[in-house]
Image (spheres, rainbow, N blue to C red):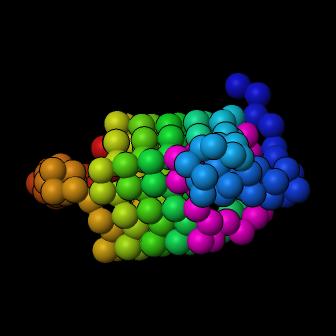
Amino acid sequence: MLMKSITKHELRDMISEHTTWLDTAGRLGKQINLSRRVVRGVNLSGRNLSKGIFVSTRFYDVKLKEAKFTGANLERAYLGPTNLSKVSFKKANLTRTNFKEAILNSTNFHGAKFNNTNFEGTLLSNALFDDDMLRKIKKRVVESMDNKTPLVLTI
């Protein structure tokens, strides 16, 4: 799969269009779509990227603290190792998303869709999950302890 990097100028324009799209409920602007793109070396902390399309997007050296990906599609996206503290992934599609070695302090995953999502080596301090997902995570932790094997969390 050929991945194309996005320039900071292109990204700034796309975020501006997306903000307009969100503010006008889709009447104006344009939904952000960074599918199969490489995003590198930018600060997106606090940005509202809700409902954006990030299928197979690769984020490298990107600051995302307190960003909003509510309802976004991040299927097969790569987000690790990144500080994702206080990021909202509420109702996001996180199927096959790779969070390997990410920092997920107080990150909100309520209503998110998980399927083969990689949390290997992540810090999940105070992360917010739905109750059924918490039960699955606890079960995997207990199984790992019972089997005396390292925990590789994929949910």
Q: Is residue 16 left or right of residue 76?
A: right
Residue at point 45%, 72% (across, down): 86
Between residue 3 and residue 120, name the one nearer to us. 3
Q: Quadrant of residue 12?
A: bottom right
Residue 87, compared with residue 52, is above or below; it is below
- Magenta highlight: main SS: loop
Is residue 106 at all visible to an observer of this figure? yes
How many numbered marks appear?
0
Residue at point 33%, 68% (across, down): 127
Q: Is residue 59 left or right of residue 144?
A: right
Residue 37, compared with residue 145, is above or below; it is above
Q: Quadrant of residue 80?
A: bottom right
Which stretch appears magenta?
A: 37-52
* Magenta span contains residue 43: yes
Is residue 58 at all visible to an observer of this figure? no
Quadrant in the picture for the N terminus = top right
Residue at point 48%, 66% (across, down): 87
* Magenta span contains residue 30: no
Quadrant in the picture for the C terminus = top left
Q: Where is residue 25? Give x, y as percent.
A: 55, 48
